[in-house]
Amino acid sequence: MKHDTLVVSAETVETIAAPATAAQVLGLIAAGLSLAAAIAAVS
Amino acid sequence: MCFRAAILPDYSHAMDAQVIEIGISDSDVVKLVPVTFREDRGNYLIGCSEYRNCCSTSALGMRAIQLLRTGLTIGAVRERLRDETGAAEVTFVPLLEHLIALGAVVSIGSRPVPVPRRRFEIALPGLTRESAGWFFSPAMLFACALLLFGAALICMMRGWPFPGPAALLLTAKLSLIILVSFGIAMANVIRHEFAHGVAAAYLGITPRFRIGYRLFFPVIETDMTGLWMTEKRGRLFALWAGIASDVFFIALLVVCAAFLQVLRPSGFTALRILSVAFFTTGAQILWEFNIWFRTDIYYLIAAALNCRNLHGDAKEYLKALVRGRKPRRYFPPGVKTYAWCLVLGYPVASLSFAAYCIGVGKSVFTSVWQESAFHPIGIGPTAKAAIVAVFLSELLLLVWAKYSELHTRAPSYRIVMGASQ
């Protein structure tokens, strides 16, 4: 017996894009400047 | 009987983008780009355009693609599928729309199908399976093992070779620290991504490098989507490659620092530069644990759980919960766990990084405008210029990534049956 409509589709497969950033260097700068500020405040 | 619910391609990122209507009729023949496929737990993964794009479909979807590739018309394919399944009607329009969005359809009838624009990417033609094999030769693997063993031995015998972070900043010229840090960080990023690229090429996948962003962090990323066409072990191998190269680099720094201490005990500047390299690399490894930004660790989790759309599935699951509805389909426990990590982690990560950004910005601008407060460590015009240069470089990368993404936003495609143009 013939019955319903079959709907054939596809599913999204995520793009694999492995990242790396150099932005942490800003953290080092922040740490350096905070330390410098602390030294300047103490001295 | 309904074989499966129609799951349309995710066009959510292109809501305001152009909608392209494509008229088709039963007499049209659909020409596809070369595709490869792999069976995965009852479904089929389809790799299009040299694995640049992948999608997943059912056995019936795979059958439809196979029939289309034989040169049958759309009407003939539908007829065959009807005969084979016993269904009253078969429609594969959602599948076709998905294949078009992936760039897998060359033409329908005599009409070429517009190819989705791609972001600016760099491929390395010389990076082949053969050339990548050199990095995984027995001699190279032995050298890496020896390096790790040597670094561990040095740490055990002589202790940690680097001074603490405070020692880096008390005596050095700040401008030198800033520029060296940034230079090393950029070199690290390139090495890290190249390691992914080499591992992917070794598996037969063509890696493509581009500039992207996560939240407000400019990143360099390696597109290895074709990894879905490999076994889980291969995926894990290519995804671990970046962090593994970071670890090998730290081991190399440890060995160099130990040699430096023996050969030139007074060479403090060189040791300080090695220390900057160590802290920068360490920060880069830690950043990869921000799984909410789809970092290496995120992809490793997705690969380990065999979830091909972990982030999207988790968002779909959470949306259903927020709307008070039962999810329309089954989500494995891994997706649910990741969804809750997303709920808890994303705000924490966003707030931390916002605080980090405000803190960095405040410190930098204070240093630039209140120079006198930093005379003890000699922040002068050179240091100021270095700080501004680093910030501008990051900003330019971010602007480029955002512009590139907006410029290549994918249109959505809608097929209109019986309206062949």
Image: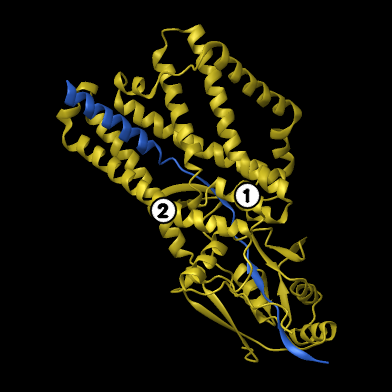
Name the residue nearer the viewer: B143 or B384: B143
Please name whichever residue, B65 or B183, is drawn nearer the observer in this view of the structure.
Answer: B65
Residue B215 bears which disc, if any? 2
- Badge 1 marks a residue whose secondary structure is loop
Is any atom of residue B379 visible in this view?
Answer: no
* SS assignment at label 2: loop
- What residue lies at 34% left-to-right and 23% top-to-bottom? B166
- Identify the disc placed on residue B280: none
Q: Residue at x 64, y 78 (%)?
A: B6
Rendered shade, chain A: blue
- Measuring from the top left, give residue B372's x and y in whole percent: 15, 28
Side (left or right) of B138 relative to B273: right
Amino acid type assigned to the residue bearing label 1 in the image: Pro
Q: Chain of mark 1?
A: B
Percent across and percent down for residue B198 are 65, 41
Q: What is the quadrant of residue B416 in the picture?
A: bottom right
Q: Earlier in the sequence, mark 1 or mark 2?
A: 1
Q: Which residue shows up at 62% across the image and 49% down it?
A: B207
Q: CA distance from mark 1 to mark 2?
A: 23 Å
Mark 1 neighbour class, 10 Å CA radius: few under 14, some 14 to 19, many 20 or more: many
Q: Please give the label number shown on residue B207.
A: 1
Tell me if residue B313 can be seen: yes
Amino acid type at mark 2: Leu
| Circle 1 or circle 2, nearest the eye | 2
